[in-house]
Amino acid sequence: MNAPGTPLSRPPSSSSYKDAPTRSVSVRDVDFVYRELGPEDGVPLILLNHLAAVLDNWDPRVVDGIAARRRVIAFDNRGVGGSGGTTPRTVEDMAHDAAMFINALGLDLVDLFGFSLGGFVAQVIAAEQPHLVRKLILAGTGPAGGQGIDKVTAITLRAALKGALTRQDPKQYLFFTDTAHGRRAGRAFLQRLTERTDNRDKPIAPPSFLAQLKAVHRWGLQTPSDLSAIRQPVLLANGERDRMVPSHNTTDLAARLPHSQLVPLYPDAGHGGIFQYHDDFVAKALAFLDAPGA
């Protein structure tokens, strides 16, 4: 067995996220695409992405900020973006695929950073495979059965229609507040997502998007899980006005997870609060990951 966190994959790139090469690893005849950067030593941080997101939807300020001190690996789960296969319709199956991807890289101990849907996936991995996970960062997310999560589909589709009518990216409405500060933050975030110009990822296909929506809806209707089973240290963050996964789900997670730390909810910020306040979030994430104890 490898020493904790030791990779079998090629060493990570030292470049910025916008220049990191896109690689692939085969898992049961399915190719998973990923990008990695940062130092070669230490426990890697696996990024678990949000609804409809591909590799290019991670904020480069967040990825580069964390990768300045930690090895970071972002990937497309099964059926998403450039990865092969068919997207599952349950969070649990997405978690199993993510764990297989991690194992395929030869990693036997990782940290997880789950944003939104990725936070649902991270909770399942941590509960089902505690030996694999050292620490978790959960942002803009909530527990199974969390209040309002079953409404994500309707909220998302309304934002998509509004975006089409106004020629705006729906993330402007879904991730940020409709205030002067929120609108500016949204425009800046969306501009950062265009910084990578070469070898960009494929957009999510409609069948995969619909499968993810079904998984999110099912997660919102599930019986609440026993979060006391997650014994790893957890850092929680969100904006104070999250419309997609209502912010009280973040405080609910903080109350129910035995070893949690809650970043004060970001003011005048929504679902994308960690991107709006990326400098503060990166500093807190690094301090959490560097702190002793697990």
Image (cartoon, helix red, strand yellow):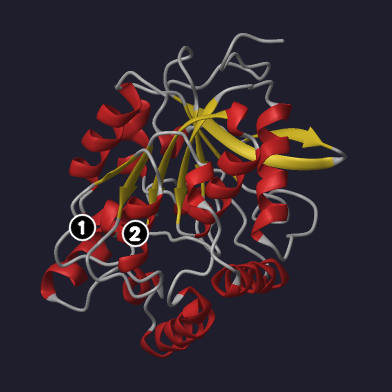
Taking 78 as reference, is 148 left or right? left
Q: Which residue ends up furthest to the right in the rendered image?
A: 29
How far from the left and from the top, in percent, is residue 42?
45, 15
Cα distance in 3D space between marks 2 and 1:
9 Å
Looking at the image, tell me whether mark 2 or mark 1 is earlier in sequence order: 2
Label 2 close to label 1 by CB (< 8 Å):
yes
Residue at the image position 46 percent from the left and 54 percent from the top:
57
How far from the left and from the top, in percent, is residue 9?
66, 20
Assign a secondary structure to mark 2. helix
Instruction: Identify whether 243 is placed above or below 229.
Output: below
Residue type at mark 2 is Thr
104, 93: nearer the viewer:
93
The disc label shown at residue 231, or none: none
Instruction: Identify whether 174 is placed above or below 190.
Output: below
Q: Residues within 10 Å of mark 2 (few under 14, many from 20)?
A: many
Residue at the image position 49 percent from the left and 81 percent from the top:
151
Residue type at mark 1 is Leu
How far from the left and from the top, in percent, is residue 228?
48, 46
262, 68: nearer the viewer:
262
Quadrant of the image containing the N terminus: top right
The disc label shown at residue 265, or none: 1
Q: Which residue is mark 2?
A: 250
Let me know if residue 250 appears in the view: yes
Quadrant of the image containing the C terminus: top left
